[in-house]
């Protein structure tokens, strides 16, 4: 999925129209926190699977 400058500019413009300039930083911060939590959760799941696959010592 390659986005060029024009597509990104259009997405930002539509977001500004929908949410307004005051709301965008809050939405970005919430999206960042959500992605971070998702990444940590998937990392935990992967670590648990690795422990289960490891042969007992």
Image (cartoon, helix red, strand yellow):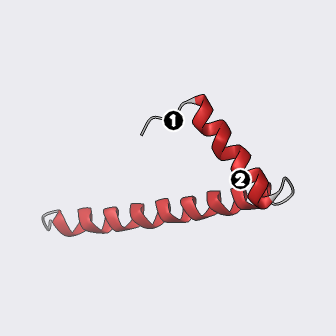
As drawn, the label of residue 35 is: none
Residue ID at (65%, 41%): 10
Residue 40: percent from the left, percent from the top?
Answer: 48, 62
As drawn, the label of residue 3 is: 1
Q: Does 51 appear above or below 1?
A: below
For this view, does 57 lie left or right of residue 44? left
Labels 2 and 1 touching (C-beta < 8 A): no
Of marks 2 and 1, which one's residue comes earlier in the chain?
1
Instruction: Give the residue furthest to the right.
Output: 22
Secondary structure under badge 2? helix
Q: Does 6 appear above or below 22?
A: above
Q: Does 34 appear above or below 28?
A: below
Residue 38: percent from the left, percent from the top?
Answer: 49, 64
> Which residue is identified by label 2?
15
Secondary structure under badge 1? loop
Give the distance between the C-alpha atoms of the residues marked 2 and 1, in whole angstroms.
16 Å
Residue ID at (87%, 57%): 22
Residue 52: percent from the left, percent from the top?
Answer: 21, 70
For this view, does 9 lie left or right of residue 2? right
Residue ID at (25%, 62%): 50
How many residues crowd mark 1 within 10 Å: few (<14), some (14–19), many (20+)? Answer: few
């Amino acid at each position: 999925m390659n986005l060029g400058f024009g597509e990104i500019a259009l997405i930002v413009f539509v977001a500004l129209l929908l949410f307004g300039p005051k709301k965008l930083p809050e939405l970005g911060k919430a999206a960042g926190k959500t992605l971070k939590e998702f990444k940590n959760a998937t990392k935990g799941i992967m670590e648990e699977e690795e422990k289960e696959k490891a042969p007992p010592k």
